[in-house]
Each structure stands twice: as C-alpha cells, then as structure tokens.
Image: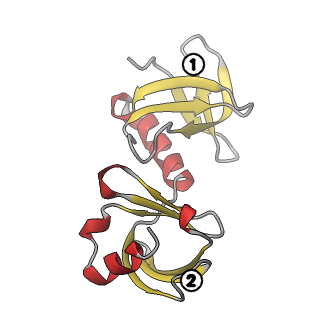
Amino acid sequence: MTPAFELHRNARGRLDCTLPDGTRHESVVPVRPFPLSAPADGLSLVGANGHEVLWIDRLDAVPQPQRSLIEEELAAREFVPVLERLLAVSTFSTPSTWTVQTDRGATQFVLKGEEDIRRLDGGALLITDAHGVSYRVRDRLGLDRHSRRLIERFL
C-alpha cells in the first residue's frame, strides 16, 4: 500500500513532496525501475540527492491530483518514440543511417553498431541511436514485410 503523501509543483516547475510525517523534499523525480518491461509496477520518487524518498507500489493506486503530476513528469523523462516502419537504411554495415516512421513522425538516425539493438520480451526491440535516443519496436514480427527484412539484416 502506498502511504499518503502530498505532491505539488514549486515556483521553478519541479515537484516537491511532503511525506505523512511532515518531511518535505524538494525537486523530486519519479523513476520507474522497469519502464519497458513493467511500466505499471513500482515507481520511486527520488530526491535531489539521488536517494529514494518514497516507493509507490502501483501508480494507479495514487490519488488523481498526484498521479497527474507524476505522469506529466514521466512523459517528459521517458521519451521513447515507437518505430512503426523502417523506410530505408544507408548500408547494411554499421554505422548506418536509418530512415524511419515513428508514432511522432518521420526521422533519420545513425545506428552505430548491431549491439545498439536490444531484444526485449514478446518480440519487442529497443534501438538506441548515436545520440542516445531510444526507439521502441513493440513487435518486430508485426511490422510490414519490408521493415522486417531490413531489421533482420542487423539482428
């Protein structure tokens, strides 16, 4: 069970947390331990010093005002576009430039090496570009034939 706590934005737009015992923590950051494999299970509010202030078992158990603030912070922190189609690759050796369609629009990125493609449970992939931006493929077998063929060359 998640203990009662107060959460609000301070003048700088950061989250401040007040625990039931009255302890106040400024500039807390919500962090999911497993954002891809278990996004609804567990969440930590981490203080400015990097230490956990509060553990939340399930986000859906948090009352609505606090939950909305946490979800806003997570959305900004966990930017992971979903790769929907692989349109083209510049070369089948790395580094290569990939032209893709994501849920946020078309873009290009550089894949430095095959090791930057991680296999996840359920046929999902996580592809990290040369700038550290991660792209998620929810189900590589669910992609169109052209996209599957291109990705298979790198797996």
Type of the residue with mark 1? Leu
Residue toward you, 127 or 65: 127
Q: Residue at x 32, y 66 (%)?
A: 140
In the image, residue 71 sits, relative to residue 94, either above or below, namely above
Residue 114 image offset from top left, x and y in percent: 54, 67
Q: Quadrant of the N terminus?
A: top left
Q: Nearer the viewer, residue 132 or 58?
A: 132
- Give the percent coordinates (x, y) of residue 29: 61, 39
Residue beneath disc 2: 97
User: Image quarter for residue 124?
Assistant: bottom left
Q: Which mark is residue 19?
A: 1
Give the residue type that dot 2 points to: Thr
Vertical arrangement, residue 124 with respect to residue 149, above or below = above
* Res 102 seen here: no
Q: Position of residue 134 (x, y in %)?
A: 53, 62
Q: Residue at x 56, y 52 (%)?
A: 77
Q: With 41 as the anchor, is 77 left or right in this view?
A: right
Crowd class of label 2 (few under 14; some 14 to 19; many from 20; radius 10 Å): some
